[in-house]
Image (cartoon, grey):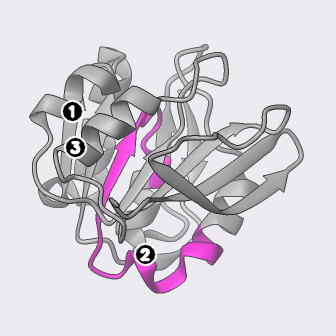
């Protein structure tokens, strides 16, 4: 099993195990560092949803940098188990919830409002418009929530009538769309 290093905060330099194979595609280190530099103090005491969690690195980095709690959603059971083990090893189990289900099905099990949502599906998958709309309908995302959608830089930022893209960043083959729910008319 390989590892990823956390880059900042209280868990800086700690390692997170990553399952081998094609089950996960970790966010490149330079993209992760830029992302968390952009987020800055937005993570302070935040409730974070790490959808399509993979290694859990984005969620663990959030906890390291001040998030109050993180919900990890991962469909691949062995990968979800690795997230649970990593949370225990890092000493953040009490601030972590792991849901083993595809993101679209996990929505029914999510409670409360999230300040930050990381949506990093496999690049071959379509933009998760229905899932994000369902989160919004449940009140888990509101106009104050920030959704960060990671996608291939070869694809334009999503055009979703329910969400406004407030910022985009590109790092080689990776693009980030920072989105907020539109205020209902």
- Identify the residue at image location x=70%, y=43%: 157
Residue 134 tag number: none
Mark 1 or mark 2: whose residue is earlier in sequence: 2
Q: CA distance from mark 3 to mark 2?
A: 29 Å
- Identify the residue at image location x=38%, y=46%: 50
Looking at the rendering, the stretch of residues picked out in magenta corresponds to 36-58
Element on which disc 2 rests: loop
Q: CA distance from mark 1 to mark 3?
A: 11 Å
User: In front: mark 1 or mark 2?
Assistant: 1
Residue 107 tag number: 1
Which quarter of the figure is the C terminus placed in? bottom left
Callout 2: few (<14), some (14-19), or many (20+) C-alpha neighbours within 10 Å? many
Residue 65 tag number: 2
Callout 3: few (<14), some (14-19), or many (20+) C-alpha neighbours within 10 Å? few
- Identify the residue at image location x=66%, y=24%: 123
17 shown above or below 6? above
Q: CA distance from mark 1 to mark 2?
A: 25 Å
The picture places residue 102, in percent across and down from the top left corner, at 32, 19
Report if residue 15 is visible in the image.
Answer: no
Question: In the current view of this chain or complex, which residue is farthest to the right?
Answer: 172
Callout 1: few (<14), some (14-19), or many (20+) C-alpha neighbours within 10 Å? some
Disc 3 designates what residue? 137
């Amino acid at each position: 099993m390989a590892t990823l290093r956390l880059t900042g905060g209280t868990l800086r330099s700690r390692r997170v195990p990553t399952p081998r194979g094609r089950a996960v595609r970790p966010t490149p280190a330079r993209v992760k560092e830029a992302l968390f530099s952009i987020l800055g103090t937005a993570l302070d005491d935040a409730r974070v949803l790490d959808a399509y969690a993979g290694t859990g690195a984005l969620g663990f980095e959030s906890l390291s940098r001040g998030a109050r709690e993180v919900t990890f959603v991962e469909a691949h059971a062995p990968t979800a188990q690795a997230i649970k083990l990593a949370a225990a090893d890092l000493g953040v189990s009490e601030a972590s919830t792991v849901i083993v289900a595809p993101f679209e099905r996990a929505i029914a099990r999510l409670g409360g409002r999230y300040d930050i949502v990381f949506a990093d599906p496999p690049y071959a998958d379509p933009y998760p418009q229905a899932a994000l709309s369902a989160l919004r309908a449940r009140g888990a995302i509101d106009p104050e929530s920030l959704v960060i959608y990671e996608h291939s830089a070869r694809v334009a930022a999503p055009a979703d009538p329910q969400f406004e893209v407030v910022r985009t960043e590109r790092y080689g083959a990776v693009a980030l769309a920072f989105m907020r729910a539109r205020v209902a008319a």
